[in-house]
Amino acid sequence: MPAVLTLLRIKNLALVEELEWQMGPGFVAVTGETGAGKSIIIGALQLLLGERADKSLIRTGADVCAVEAVFSGNGLQKLNPQLVEAGVEPCESDLILKRTLSTTGTNRQFINGSPTTLSILKNLGDELVDLHGPHDHQSLLSPDRQLNLLDSFARAEEQLGEYRKHYRQLQTLLAEHAALDTAETAREQELDLLRHQVAEIKSANLVAGEEEEVENRYKLASNSKRLIELASAIANKLSEADDSVLSQLAETQRLLRELEKIDNSIAQYSSAHAASVVELAEIVRGLSVYAEQLAAVEQRVSLFETLKRKYGRSIGEVIAFGERAAERMQKIEGRDAELEHLAQQIGNVRAQMNRAGEALRKLRTKAAPKLSENIRRNLRDLGFRQSEFEAKLSALNEPRPSGFDSVDLLFSPNPGEPLKPLRAIASSGEISRLMLAIKSALAMHDAIALLVFDEIDTNVGGEIAHAVGAKMETLGRDHQVICITHLPQVAATASSHFVVTKDISHGRTFSNLNEVTGKARQEEIARMLGGKSESALKLAATLLKQS
């Protein structure tokens, strides 16, 4: 089962204190008097779809407003890779979106209970809901949007993805080629800098993971400067000064040897003295090594800090910088060979891109007349009996991320008038019906299960209103359709019908939403026809029976 919206909860949003709306699949109509609060439902959905929010939306007297939606269906599983990438638990049969806004300006959003960002919520919303309002026809004027419509009808997503992959590869290779093929002076200057950077990093003999070990040793010897001073002072006193202990002991050693020549009995003292001299010399050597090691650690830490200031936040980043610099240096030193290699790669990727682009063009060329005929047929159903419509494909001078083509949707509502771009159409009623015709043509190709129409039937009536209702009913067979409408002919065709009312209690205004069936629905249709007179009630019954 495709994903459908099964529950919408609204709390403290504008005139709504608390609302829980349960709905099923098919065509759902929402009606109500002007000012009752129908637009609040659209506003709630827009919040869940990642639209920017303002704390003025919070109901007077409340601190927080919240909107929550539950989508159900096996079709949700296709969203799991996107959810996992966003750090959200994947869904099986239900997807829960929630957004809260407080008077302090705090804005929070959740997917399946996990906090998320507004951009992730918006990207997910684009996969779940397609919302159209009275001003959304502006999107039809965009050349990119028009090309997207044609690609959707042509089922060209896979071929477009293949083309874009090669297009991006080509742009990367062209940028590398341009960067390498710079002026000679600039090239030499960069080469000198790279040689210095590579030599400086290489001479440091850096090892990944060494930084932590050295810094730990440095922390253990946190008084290293004082330790070096003390060790050096001791070594100086023992060995290096003019009146050092070892130099004086050398003199006493000589005297003892003279004494031993005269009296052999003191040989033991002479030997002990010699051993003491050796031990002191060992102490001197040990202290010298100790001081050198401390100095080396201090110098190593200092070197690390110097390199990190220049090349990265860690030794790992410094090593990576050195590797990139060495690679860049090799490329520049072997510039001619690398340029030739890049040129060959550019030729190969360009050929792949051209093949993908031509395949994409064939799909579009084949689909454009079919889309045009499909929309013309829908337009005739919507009252444009003798209108003309054409999706005109044109070749671009240069490849773009979207391919080799542009498309212009041309429309003529009346016979004898030339086809004109959609931006030349002045009537909002005409553009609204045209949008409905396009959505109807794309219905079987549209992966988005929920279509929301906010008064798209503005400025139409009579027989055309019946046609609009019939189109909505047809769309509801393959999609879940929510339509906010003022037309009784449209509301009567819905599989379920909800009414928004505005009530006043204890000096406060409340908007409420209730499903109407049977007699209550007949009375609402009659109200929309102009009143609850006997004739209006009979006409309402006729409309419901016909539907």
Image: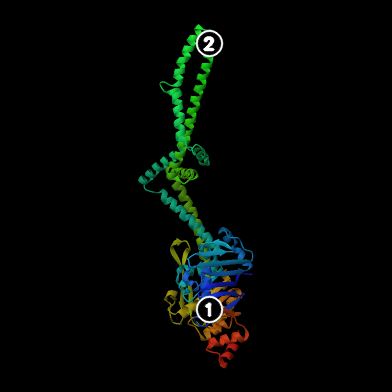
Q: Looking at the image, is mark 1 or mark 2 nearer the viewer?
A: 2
Residue 126 in the image: above or below residue 344: below
Near mark 1 (Cα within 10 A), the count class, few <14, some 14-19 or many ≥20, is some
Q: In this view, which residue lies farthest toward the bottom?
A: 534
Near mark 2 (Cα within 10 A), the count class, few <14, some 14-19 or many ≥20, is some
Q: Quadrant of residue 31?
A: bottom right
Q: Which secondary structure lies at badge 1?
A: strand
The residue identified by callout 1 is 510
Q: In this view, which residue lies farthest toward the top?
A: 262
Residue 88 in the image: above or below residue 380: above
The residue identified by callout 2 is 266
User: Which residue occupies 46% across, 23% down?
Assistant: 238
Q: Position of residue 114 (x, y in %)?
A: 57, 61
Q: Position of residue 280 (x, y in %)?
A: 50, 22
Q: Nearer the viewer, residue 256 or 156?
A: 256
Q: Position of residue 450 (x, y in %)?
A: 57, 72
Residue 11 in the image: above or below residue 277: below
Q: In this view, which residue lies farthest toward the left?
A: 185
The amino acid type, in three-letter code, at marker 1 is Phe
Q: Nearer the viewer, residue 217 or 24?
A: 217
User: Which residue occupies 46% across, 49% down?
Assistant: 342
> Quick one: quadrant of the N terminus?
bottom right
